[in-house]
């Protein structure tokens, strides 16, 4: 019995050690994960459909996130503050006569890689490569769709007005149409990229045009902090004990962000990331994923219901492609692909509208507008992982197929997530769904929701009261002037 217990302990320790060695932090960075690190991670239990013989793709919808980007100006400043505070921590340790042998070597002379940078958030060179290669792979995978002479009406490319998204669209187009033109050694060609105004783009930036959503997201901040606090507190305590530094929760939060940026942008995993054990990384990743779930995903139906204009745009393009196929329209006279480039705030809600990454009966629950449970905490497994749902350059492709007349249905929709077939709970868990079923079961139930009603209903109500409101403000202002009211003014301009 004693020998058996010792053997079991040895096997457990060996198994944990191997798991730690096999752990790749670059696959656990939530939405800061690079595309190449996770694009081929698929569920082992799902077997993709065999496309029936004679079925050919006739149209493609793409909704893609921008590629790997640089940190924003706000985050650049945060990293410079972290560098200053690390110096203070080391100086404090010296004054307390503590041994510095435990201090990570990279701490001593570390400066933020983005020190002095005045701008931020732009598409990184790695992001350019992600989208360029994606464009090449899409063309090679669907030669029947991309066999026409380029025209902006045949292959419209749409993007938001945010530079990293439009640059991603350009990189993708360069890959998609490489060798098709006469420009330079790569025989590139010019192509059009169009966008709507940020103030009115309800298809790709519906989240920015939705006041109800912006109010909701702002009010959720305390909830995030409450969820994250126990984990950050526990990890802060563990690292403070290990290194004998007076780390704060903000330090740990900034070091986790640094880990994600170093891994994604610089391929450095032996500095900030090495501070955290695989277990701690999994917990920090989970807190990021939970935040994404709450404000971009299934945590509230508004998060994805406001994406209905995009879903309508996708369905419209499919219906037009079917009409063109039915009418035997001349090739080159109709659209064959609609290619869109936006943000995680676009891709995540769109994935939710399709019912992706759900567990068991969750699809029926969201159709009934019932709230879903939060994704389970590690070490429990979960479908909802930011690194899979919306990594940099993450994407959904909806491919419309035309099949022979003897098929159960003439038109089918296949959904690919990050280029791999993915099951649709609304279509019996298959990735190859009859178009009519896709339309009736997955898409149109969402159309009972009106974007303006969801997003701006309270603004319409306030329009009926401005005169009364301003008049009352005027009277209050007059009476304050007439008396000795020392109440400070709130700066209301009348």
Image (cartoon, helix red, strand yellow):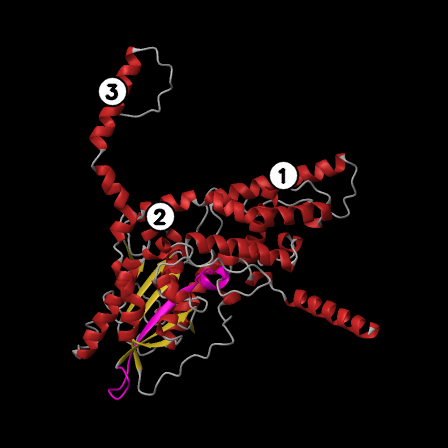
Which quarter of the image is occupied by the C terminus?
Answer: top left
Q: CA distance from mark 2 to mark 1?
A: 36 Å
In this rendering, is residue 463 above or below 483?
A: below
> As rendered, which of 201 and 456 lies closer to the eye?
456
In this rendering, is residue 266 above or below 483?
A: below
Q: CA distance from mark 2 to mark 3?
A: 34 Å
Give coordinates of residue 102: x percent, y percent. 75, 48
Residue highlighted by disc 3 = 475
Q: Nearer the viewer, mark 1 or mark 3?
A: 3
Give coordinates of residue 11: x percent, y percent. 74, 72
> As rendered, which of 333 and 421 lies closer to the eye?
421
Check disc 2: other Cα within 10 Å, few if <14, some if 14-19, many if 20+.
Answer: many
Q: Answer with mark 1 or mark 3, whichever residue precedes in sequence.
A: 1
Q: Magenta segment: does it hold 394? A: yes
Give coordinates of residue 59: x percent, y percent. 28, 73
Residue 256 can be seen in this image: yes
Horizontally, residue 377 falls left or right of residue 419, namely right
Q: CA distance from mark 1 to mark 3?
A: 51 Å
Are discs 2 and 1 less than 8 Å apart at CB? no
Q: Which mark is residue 85?
A: 1
> What element does badge 3 sit on?
helix
Residue 355 can be seen in this image: no
Check disc 3: other Cα within 10 Å, few if <14, some if 14-19, many if 20+.
Answer: few
Q: Answer with mark 2 or mark 3, whichever residue precedes in sequence.
A: 2
In this rendering, is residue 365 above or below 434?
A: above
Q: Magenta segment: does it hold 384? A: no
Q: Which residues are magenta?
A: 385-409
Are discs 2 and 3 less than 8 Å apart at CB? no
Residue highlighted by disc 2 = 213
Q: Which residue occupies 59% across, 53% down?
A: 259
């Amino acid at each position: 019995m004693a020998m058996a217990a010792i053997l079991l302990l040895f096997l457990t320790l060996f198994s944990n050690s191997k798991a730690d060695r096999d752990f790749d932090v670059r696959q656990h960075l939530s939405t800061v994960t690079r595309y190449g690190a996770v694009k081929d991670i698929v569920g082992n239990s799902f077997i993709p459909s065999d496309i029936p013989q004679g079925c050919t793709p006739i149209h493609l919808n793409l909704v893609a996130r921008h590629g790997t980007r640089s940190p924003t100006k706000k985050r650049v400043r945060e990293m410079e503050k972290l560098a200053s505070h690390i110096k203070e921590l080391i100086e404090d340790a010296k004054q307390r006569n503590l041994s510095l042998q435990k201090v990570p070597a990279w701490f001593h002379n570390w400066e933020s890689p983005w020190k002095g940078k005045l701008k931020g958030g732009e598409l990184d060179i790695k992001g350019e490569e992600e989208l360029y290669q994606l464009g090449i792979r899409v063309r090679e995978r669907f030669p029947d769709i991309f066999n026409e002479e380029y025209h902006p009406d045949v292959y419209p490319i749409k993007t938001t007005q945010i530079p990293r998204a439009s640059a991603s669209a350009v990189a993708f187009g360069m890959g998609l149409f490489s060798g098709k033109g006469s420009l330079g050694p790569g025989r590139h060609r010019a192509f059009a990229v169009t966008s709507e105004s940020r103030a009115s783009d309800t298809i790709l930036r519906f989240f920015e045009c939705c006041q109800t959503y912006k109010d909701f997201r702002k009010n959720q901040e305390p909830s995030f902090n409450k969820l994250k606090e126990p984990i950050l507190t526990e990890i802060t305590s563990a690292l403070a004990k290990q290194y004998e530094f007076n780390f704060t929760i903000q330090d740990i939060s900034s070091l986790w962000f640094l880990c994600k940026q170093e891994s994604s942008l610089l391929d450095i995993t032996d500095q900030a990331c090495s501070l955290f054990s695989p277990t701690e990384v999994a917990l920090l990743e989970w807190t990021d994923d939970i935040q994404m779930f709450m404000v971009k995903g299934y945590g509230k139906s508004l998060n994805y219901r406001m994406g209905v204009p995009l879903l309508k745009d996708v369905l419209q393009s499919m219906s037009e492609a079917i009409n063109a196929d039915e009418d035997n329209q001349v090739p080159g006279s109709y659209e064959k692909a609609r290619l869109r480039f936006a943000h995680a705030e676009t891709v995540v809600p769109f994935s939710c509208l399709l019912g992706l990454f759900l567990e068991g009966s969750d699809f029926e629950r969201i159709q009934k507008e019932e709230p879903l449970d939060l994704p389970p905490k590690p070490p429990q497994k979960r479908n909802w992982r930011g690194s899979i749902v919306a990594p940099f350059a993450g994407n959904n492709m909806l491919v419309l197929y035309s099949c022979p007349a003897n098929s159960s249905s003439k038109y089918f929709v296949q959904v690919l997530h990050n280029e791999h077939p993915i099951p649709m709970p609304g279509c019996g868990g298959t990735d190859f769904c009859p178009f009519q079923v896709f339309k009736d079961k997955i898409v149109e139930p969402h159309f009972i929701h009106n974007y303006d009603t969801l997003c701006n209903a309270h603004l319409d109500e306030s329009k009926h009261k401005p005169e009364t409101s301003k008049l009352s403000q005027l009277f209050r202002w007059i009476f304050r002037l007439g008396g000795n009211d020392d109440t400070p003014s709130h700066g209301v301009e009348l």
